[in-house]
């Protein structure tokens, strides 16, 4: 005669728990298989000049030093925080650009210290805008830039604003635009900037990005100074139309602030660009 004991777990109770365990395991598996780029995408506003150069173009060597026909400069953003401008001045840096804005949603919280600080130690200074052509129009971003530090004054110490147009750190390299649409966006920005300030903005870019995303357009070479990004011993092939560069960002690992640049001319040429 069979004996029944209370408290014995019957097999059917185990089968009821199995579906729940399976769901939990599936959920954990999903967490660990999310696309890597979701975690790696930087926060909006954190972009800065040359952010994609090493990843896309690499780095190979540095230019020769002591060339009297070139003038050392730097570019900074919120990544550098409060900058030791007197240290840079003593090391021979004579001009600087500070990030003012990005898109129409970000202003650099360190801009005043950077923009005014460089000026106060004697440098010739300028401001730059990190373009996000996928968020708002070129003209809208030009207005935002001018309204938030990107203007110009004829004081002999203020350079024209710079448009930083390069790889999209937040998504597709060309911001989802065709080559012709990108050229139109850039033109709209530059036209509006000139309408507001009377100056032709500097274009900061890399030849590889420019070729990929504008079709190597030569539309702006006649009016807009070129600031080329290439971390190597020479600036390499320039975008179509430009026979020379005005500025060259040659490293992101220089002394004090990282990003260092060469102006293609002695200090009097920097002053000439500032004067317009």
Image: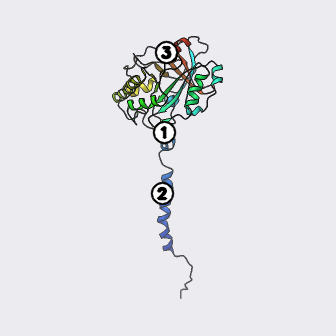
Q: Earlier in the sequence, mark 2 or mark 3?
A: 2
* Residue, far left: 180
Tag 2, which secondary structure?
A: helix
Tag 1, which secondary structure?
A: loop
Q: Nearer the viewer, residue 167 or 91?
A: 91
Tag 3, which secondary structure?
A: helix
* Residue, far bottom: 1
* CB atoms of marks 1 and 3 within 8 Å: no
Residue 167's image quarter?
A: top left
In the rendered image, the vertical position of residue 209 relative to residue 66, given as above or below: below
Q: Which residue is mark 3?
A: 275
- Judged left or right of residue 196, residue 39 is right
- Judged left or right of residue 200, residue 110 is right
Give x and y (percent) for residue 65: 61, 15
Residue 44, which numbered label? 1
- Judged left or right of residue 164, residue 74 is right
Q: Is residue 6 visible?
A: yes
- Judged left or right of residue 91, residue 172 is left
Q: How many marks?
A: 3
Q: Is residue 252 visible?
A: no
Residue drawn where x is 49% and y is 43% of the image: 36
Q: Earlier in the sequence, mark 2 or mark 1?
A: 2
CA distance separating discs 1 and 3? 34 Å
CA distance separating discs 2 and 1? 32 Å
In the rendered image, the vertical position of residue 129 relative to residue 70, given as above or below: below
Which mark's residue is nearer the viewer, 1 or 3? 3
Give x and y (percent) for residue 209: 44, 27
Residue drawn where x is 42% and y is 36% of the image: 172
Q: Which residue is mark 2?
A: 26
Crowd rating for badge 1 (residues with CA inside 10 Å; few <14, some 14–19, many 20+): few
């Amino acid at each position: 005669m069979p004996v029944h004991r209370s408290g014995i777990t019957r097999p059917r109770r185990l089968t009821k728990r199995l579906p729940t365990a399976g769901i939990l395991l599936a959920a954990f598996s999903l967490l660990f298989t999310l696309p890597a780029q979701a975690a790696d995408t930087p926060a909006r506003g954190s972009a800065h000049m040359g952010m994609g150069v090493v990843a896309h173009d690499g780095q190979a060597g540095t230019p020769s030093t002591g060339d009297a026909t070139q003038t050392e400069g730097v570019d900074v953003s919120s990544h550098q925080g409060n900058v030791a401008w007197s240290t840079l001045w003593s090391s021979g840096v004579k001009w600087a650009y500070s990030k003012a804005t990005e898109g129409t949603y970000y202003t650099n919280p360190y801009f005043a210290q950077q923009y005014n600080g460089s000026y106060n130690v004697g440098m010739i200074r300028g401001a730059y805008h990190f373009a996000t052509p996928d968020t708002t129009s070129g003209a809208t971003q030009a207005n935002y830039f001018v309204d938030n530090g990107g203007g110009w004054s004829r004081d002999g110490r203020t350079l024209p604003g710079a448009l930083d147009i390069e790889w999209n750190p937040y998504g597709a390299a060309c911001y989802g635009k065709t080559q012709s649409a990108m050229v139109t966006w850039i033109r709209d920005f530059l036209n509006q900037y000139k309408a507001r300030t009377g100056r032709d903005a500097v274009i900061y870019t890399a030849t590889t990005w420019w070729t990929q995303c504008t079709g190597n357009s030569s539309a702006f070479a006649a009016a807009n100074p070129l600031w080329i990004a290439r971390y190597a011993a020479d600036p390499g092939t320039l975008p179509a139309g430009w026979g020379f560069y005005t500025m060259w960002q040659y490293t992101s690992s220089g002394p004090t602030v990282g990003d260092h640049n060469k102006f293609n001319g002695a200090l009097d040429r920097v002053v000439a660009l500032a004067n317009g």
